[in-house]
Amino acid sequence: MTNTPDTVDRHIARWQPVVPDLDVDIEGAVTRMIRLTRHLRTVKERVLVDLDLPAHEYDTLHALAGRRGRAAPSDLAADLAMAPASITARVDALLRRGFVRRIPSTVDRRRVDVELTEEGHAAWRGAMDIQGAEERRLLGALTPTERRQLSDLLRQVLLVAERPPGDQPSGSPDKQ
């Protein structure tokens, strides 16, 4: 545990006189999450530019990789929260770059699946490796036990965020 002030501590010090009832722990946690998310997004954007890989192409490769390298276009569309017709242009662009190929489906002969090529897997993996290195660098400030605790605590918060407002499980009053 470090007591070295960071930019968020200075942010809180500026705002405390303006908002006397500011909960410094909530403000600190939320502002740090926002800044870390922004940092990781910036790293990802820089990596993708350096690799000449547009974000939408990376996202499509990532969705394919998450399905073991092969999926129906409709499954990709669902994974990417897109209209199925919108996936065609993405697949066409990846096909031109040699990152995917279309192959007959093994479950429905009327359907064509999309499959990662070795080049597509290498492009996706290259971006993942660089991003992962930055994530490990940041979270390397914590011990393995602290990383597990952080993950568990964030899970608790995310579970609340994923519920509709006012939909709190019975028997779980707000913690003080």
Image (cartoon, rainbow, N blue to C red):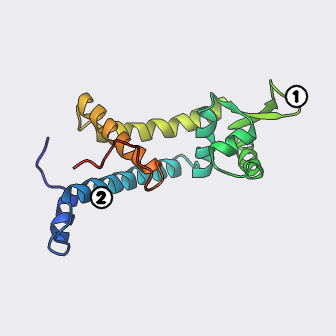
Q: Secondary structure at mark 2?
A: helix
Towards the viewer: 53 or 55: 55
Towards the viewer: 170 or 122: 170
- Say if 32 sits above or below 12 in the image: above
Query: Is 131 left or right of 137, judged from the image as shown?
Result: right
Residue at image location 41% in from the left, 37% down from the top: 132
Give how far across and how far down residue 107 sits, in percent: 81, 25
Res. 116 visible in picture: no
Query: Is 41 left or right of 154, judged from the image as shown?
Result: right
Residue at image location 50% in from the left, 49% down from the top: 50
Give how far across and how far down residue 108 sits, in percent: 84, 28
- Residue lying at the far bottom of the rendered structure: 18
Give how far across and how far down residue 149 sits, in percent: 27, 34
Residue at image location 14% in from the left, 73% down from the top: 17
Q: How many marks?
A: 2
Query: Is 105 left or right of 13, judged from the image as shown?
Result: right
Mark 2, residue position: 31
Question: In the rendered structure, which amino acid carries the disc numbered 2?
Answer: Thr
Towards the viewer: 18 or 5: 18
The image quadrant that residue 137 belongs to is: top left
Mark 1, residue position: 109
Give how far across and how far down residue 39 sits, in percent: 37, 53
For disc 2, the neighbor class at 10 Å (few under 14, some 14 to 19, many from 20) is some
For disc 1, the neighbor class at 10 Å (few under 14, some 14 to 19, many from 20) is few
- For the N terminus, the image quarter is top left
Question: In the rendered structure, which amino acid carries the disc numbered 1?
Answer: Arg
